[in-house]
Amino acid sequence: AIDFLILQMIELEVIKKEEKETVRREFLSHPHKFQELLEPYQENLFFSPAQFFEASLGREAEELESPLPFLVPDAEILDVGRNSFEVLLTPSLYFQLTINEEVLSFYRKRKKNTPEREKIFWQEKLEEAREVVSCLNYRNQLLLRVLDYIVEREKDFLLRGFRHFVPLTQKEVAEGVGVSVSAVCQVLKEKSICFPDGVVRSVKFFFDSSYPVKEMMKLILAQEAPHRPLSDREIVKELEKKGFHIARRTCALYREEMGVLPSYLRKKLKEK
């Protein structure tokens, strides 16, 4: 009942509007207890809580020691020179796990004088720990192998630009690494990677056949006449001249995904 009362006071702003009598008559059968229940909330609730934000913003900004959180990629492609690239897994996310040596030492020292039941318990837990460590380390190694293979296949793209981009398939990567397609799918799930230019992209990027087409569309649209923007059909014809063959509907879909307006709207905007 009290919570409902407080909710009503907040929604109706009864305290601010000095409508205490209305609430007292409507929700409480004992009016003399009203003020007693109300006081703690009057002291701790504020009708304009943001009024304290502006004053404290400058002070809090000065006290802020660390930068705002940002996306941490799972790996980074390093340009090591001589037309070579190296993949480095992010150390804070992927590191070599081992079983605590102090725990192992403690177990070994007590092993001879440990009751059989306790010994079995220790052995089971150690086996479980070894299995977890082995699985996690294998996952890290597999991720690195898969990314190494992808980067090696896309070396021309990394060196020479989007015209040399060749979209891959998970089956192709799986065969190249020597694992199952499901293993590749699982190890790359929701992974991101930082390119040499500092751009962080999802690893799905390497399997996106639309990327080079969209990049070429950007160049074509950048060169269109302001007074006569290209229609989707005309963009398709220009793409064909560059060696990209897609349907008009596909072109319209890519254009929408790129956030580019239809030709008649682009024309209206440029006329203003």
Image: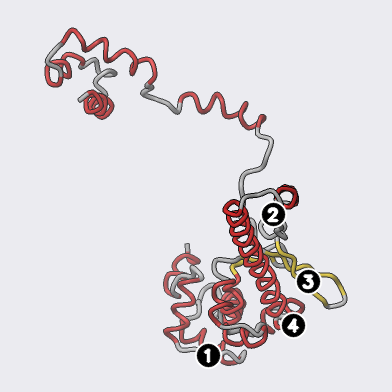
Question: Mark 3 to mark 2: distance in Å?
Answer: 18 Å
The answer to which of marks 4 and 3 sits earlier in the sequence is 3
* Residue 135 vs residue 82, the one in the foreground: 135
Checking the image for residue 237, the label placed there is: 1
Residue at the disc numbered 4? 156
Of badges 4 and 3, the one in the foreground is 3
Element at label 4: helix
Tell us which disc is closer to us: 3 or 2: 2
Q: Does 49 sit above or below residue 243?
A: above
Specify which label sits upstream in the sequence, 1 or 3.
3
Tell me which amino acid carries mark 1. Answer: Lys
Residues under labels 4 and 2: Cα distance?
30 Å
- Quarter of the figure with residue 49: top left
| Structural distance between the alpha carbons of marks 1 and 4 | 27 Å
Residue under numbered circle 3: 86
Mark positioned earlier in the residue sequence (3 or 2): 3
